[in-house]
Amino acid sequence: MTATDREGLRAAGVKREAGGRLVLDGVDLAPPPGATVGLIGPNGSGKSTLLRIMAGVLAPHAGTVTLDGRTLAETGRRTVARRVAVVDQHAVTQVELSVLDVVRLGRIPHRRAWSAAGPEDEEAVREALERTGLADHAGQSWHTLSGGERQRVQIARALAQRPRELLLDEPTNHLDIQHQLELLALVAALPVTAVIALHDLNLAAMFCDRITVMAHGKVVAAGTPSEVLTRELIAEVYRVRAVVTDDGPDGRPSVRFLPGAPLGSLPGSQSEPLPGSQSGDAPPAATTAAPPGTGR
Amino acid sequence: MTAPAPAPSRPRKTPPPRATGVRVLRDGLLWTGGAALLVLSVAVAVTIGPARISVPDVWSTVGAHLGLGESRLTPIRDGIIWNLRMPRTLLAAVCGAGLAVCGTVMQSLLRNPLADPFVLGVSSGASTGAVAVVVLGVGGGAVSVSAGAFLGALCSFALVLLLSHTLGGTTDRVVLSGVAAMQLFSALTSFVVMTAADAEQTRGVLFWLLGSLSGVGWSDVWVCAAVLAVALLVCLGHARTLDAFVFGQEAAASLGVHVGRTRLVLLCTTALLTAALVSSAGAIGFVGLVLPHAARALTGSGHRRLLPVTALAGAVFLVWVDTLARTVLDPQEVPVGVVTALIGVPAFVLVLYRTRRNP
């Protein structure tokens, strides 16, 4: 183990029990600094719990989460909040407040109890608004925003924390496809280490540098999108049939789902052509949009 | 690199973020204006009543009692100002400020626009305590009515905390436990009054249950003002932390807030303050519920600005409501809680109507 191995936010052997069931059963996650890591897996596989534990909001029952080699408990909640920011799938409030008010919340961990906001706070807020394209909407009421705009405001709030690690729990869940793409492009371009729990495998393939797959509270696969997203893995983890081709943007994998049970449980289906398994060859279904190399 | 995302889909005319200097100036005006309004309200409210007294009379008396020159009034008129109306008006201000602050903190902390000292059962506990002393003679005369109310409030609050903790400790559990405690203590109070009290005692208890500032003295003012000062300092110290609760406890935790500790400190502070106020002035309803909503409409949601403004607004509000309560049916006196509800309900509806949102 070298010094760089201990840098950043890491989960090691994390376990968490709920209702007599292991929600997390010895999970390791070590996002490389600056990378965008996708966390995928079926409902109830433990993605959200893992993110909450890595944010320090929930304590692990066993194992550790460390920030630069020190556990979150040793580091202290406020110091953690200055480094690690969280965006949830759905932020709800009844309080009347503006976009600017929400983004300013991000400065709370940086301010002392009695002090007013200083120039550094104002600067961080301004920068966060600009980076998320919200500078002209600072005065707008939160309640007049659409779902996509609200998530963008939450990301601006997270950026105002000036984090080095950003944890996002299904941030695109309630958004239409345009806003999903927009939001993930924004996150992937940020100069932070991002861990994003996602449901959509194609979005994960498109925007993540690495993907970690969880099932039943365990990590079952981890690596680059093309290493991880295979027909076999999808059949095993999600119990669905899929075709995986490498004609996504930049030659990334592209997943198409098929009706019916996965191959293993359907006798006789082995004879079907499996384009995904012949990576490198010209895929038979060349109807899909972008040829490799066109980028996003 | 990705181009900046396009502008939000529904642009509308919105004011640009206010410059810090302008905000500071506006806050200063709001606070000095509010404080001046409060002083003026107290001075004018003291002059209103059966005995004719002018504002200069009030200044003169107050000056004399603070050791600045001689009072030019007869001892009786001086007594009316200094021993009757002054403590009563000041206690109204303290109670209004305290109840409004309690309501603000509880609403923000529990993320429930209906939370206030009464919903959390504190005032019901206080009334049971008082009734136990007045009607049942608990304490054998060694315990005053105020002390009984104070102990009752603390018992009720302890029950709420214990219940909500046992039931899972989530925000809605706290509110539901409060409602349960409120019902329980109201029932106990009614039971005691129905079975044990005579007509005279019933009348006294009823008056007290509805809240009344009649017959308060300087000692009530000092005790309540001291508790209010401490509680206000604690709450202002947590202003930044209270802001963090706007998107819920977990969001607050991810912003570096120790949620459990903060909640315990602030709920205990507000419960103690409520207990002190209720033991002096009875259960004055609606101030803690309505004033925070009105103040939020004025200042926005940031607690550094909201808490002082709420306190000032509550103080001014209750000074005038109490003046109305003691003069409107002169020489009869209406319980102040009745007037707060009669004025508060339409005001509440108006505030909610103005801040309603299209679904």
Image (cartoon, coloured by chain):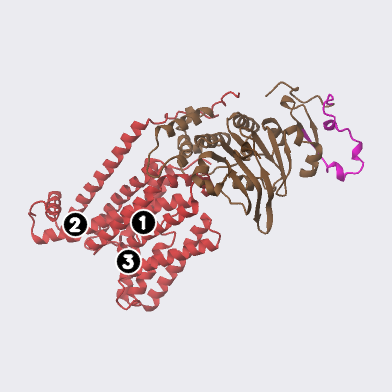
Chain colours: A brown, B red
From the image, tell me which residue sits under label 1.
Answer: B341
**Above-or-below relation of B13 to B344:** above
Determine which residue is flagged by label 2: B49
For residue B199, above or below residue A251: below
Residue B91 in sight:
yes
Disc number lying in front (3 or 1): 3
Q: Estimate the x, y position of residue B335 in percent, counting from the top left.
A: 30, 62
Extreme-front residue of the structure: A2
- Pick whichever, B252 or A259, lies toward us: B252
> Which numbered circle lies on residue B208?
3
How many angstroms separate mark 3 from mark 1 (CA)?
Answer: 15 Å
- In the rendered structure, does residue A101 fall within the stretch colored magenta? no
Q: Earlier in the sequence, mark 3 or mark 1?
A: 3
Whole-number angstrom distance, CA of label 1 to CA of label 2: 22 Å
Magenta stretch: residue A264 in it?
Answer: yes
Whether label 3 touches label 1, CB < 8 Å: no
- Residue A172 visible (yes or no): no
- Which quarter of the picture shows residue B66? bottom left
The amino acid type found where label 3 is placed reads Trp
- Residue B103 vs residue B11, the one in the foreground: B103
* Residue segment shown in magenta: A255-283
Q: Chain of mark 3?
A: B
Q: Secondary structure at mark 1?
A: helix
**Which of the 4 quarters of the picture holds residue A212?**
top right
